[in-house]
Amino acid sequence: MATEHAEGLTEIFDTVAALAPEIREALPGRRVKSDETNPSGETQLAADSYADELFLDRLGDLDGVVEYASEERTKAVHTDDDGQNYDAGDLSVAIDPLDGSSNLQSNNTMGTIVAVYDAPLPASGADLVGAAYVLFGPITTMITADDEGVTEYLVDDGTRQVIREDVTLPEEPSVYGFGGRVPDWPADFADYADEVEADDTMKLRYGGAMIGDINQVLTYGGVFSYPALQSAPNGKLRLQFEGNPIGFIIESAGGRSSDGSGSILDVEPTDLHQRVPVHVGNEGLVERLEAALD
Ligand code: AHM
Ligand code: MG
């Protein structure tokens, strides 16, 4: 790993793992909607803002972290005394504090997504030095990706206990999950979906929280898409907080990411909250998708 970032990245991942049980414990009393909307116009839950404040507080305290941004706040926060100067070794963290938080109402899977860039935000996927997610499932697990590969941990007690090293996508894919209302899909994506559904080795797995669906793809092999929609040409998911880190994790696990024409990691960052179509999974499935959307 690029040595100037190894320590900073470890501290960030350890801090996220340490907060996982705290966040989990705070969820039962925070399932109610707040009066606030996030910068993408979605109603926030009390849990969204609580988790966001907690991550800002703890990650912002780390020496290496100079900038913090999240899906839940309009602007990035500068968290060091050095103003806006970006020095070698400095890191920016972009977080989706509670991905899939609408699942909190129905008590289903949710996650936290973490992107660590060595550049000011909004940054390109090429500036990522690491990415991670926490999955609040029946047990709490965490996936990290850096230039040494992808690792899965148990984080139920706030420390990282390795479950699997060198996580790679299984070669024979078997699951797919596609977001957005079906009548809102563009015709070329609908044709691709038909093709995947016609394959009798593939099963639908879609849970309304990207992290849950992505973990199925990492476990069984397959493809997850939140495509461009007729009503939303850039889809729903956000580049800094969702598309880039998930693209980085899946590519680090030997898969591919795409915005429909090329790697998500090559998408030019223009705005902190910009959206991007997200397609990730086994190489063959993502290549077929790009051919279908061509
Ligand atoms: P969120 O980060 O505000 O929770 O939104 C992102 C979530 C993803 O986890 C999931 O894939 C998608 O929104 C589900 O959207 P929909 O409810 O439109 O299917
Ligand atoms: Mg999200």
Image (cartoon, helix red, strand yellow):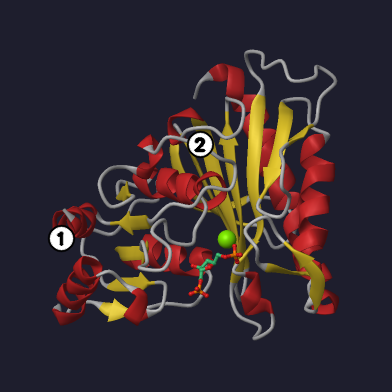
Q: Residue furthest front?
A: 231
Q: Which residue is mark 2?
A: 270
The quadrant in which residue 282 appears is bottom left
Above or below, 182 relative to 114: below
**Amino acid found under the numbered disc labelled 2:** Thr
Q: Quarter of the image holding residue 88? A: top right
- Could you tell me residue 125's position as x and y percent? 45, 36
Q: Residue at x 70, y 63 (%)?
A: 156
Q: Amino acid at mark 1?
A: Ala
Q: Which mark is residue 292?
A: 1
Numbered marks: total: 2
- Answer with mark 2 or mark 1, whichever residue precedes in sequence: 2
Specify whether 284 is left or right of 119. Answer: left
Q: Position of residue 219 (x, y in %)?
A: 39, 64
Q: Is residue 200 visible?
A: no
User: Which residue is at the front of the view, 186 or 264?
Assistant: 186
Q: Residue at x 68, y 78 (%)?
A: 104
Q: Is residue 181 above or below residue 64?
A: below
Q: Would you call the spot at circle 1 few (<14 residues within 10 Å), some (14-19), or many (20 or more)?
A: some
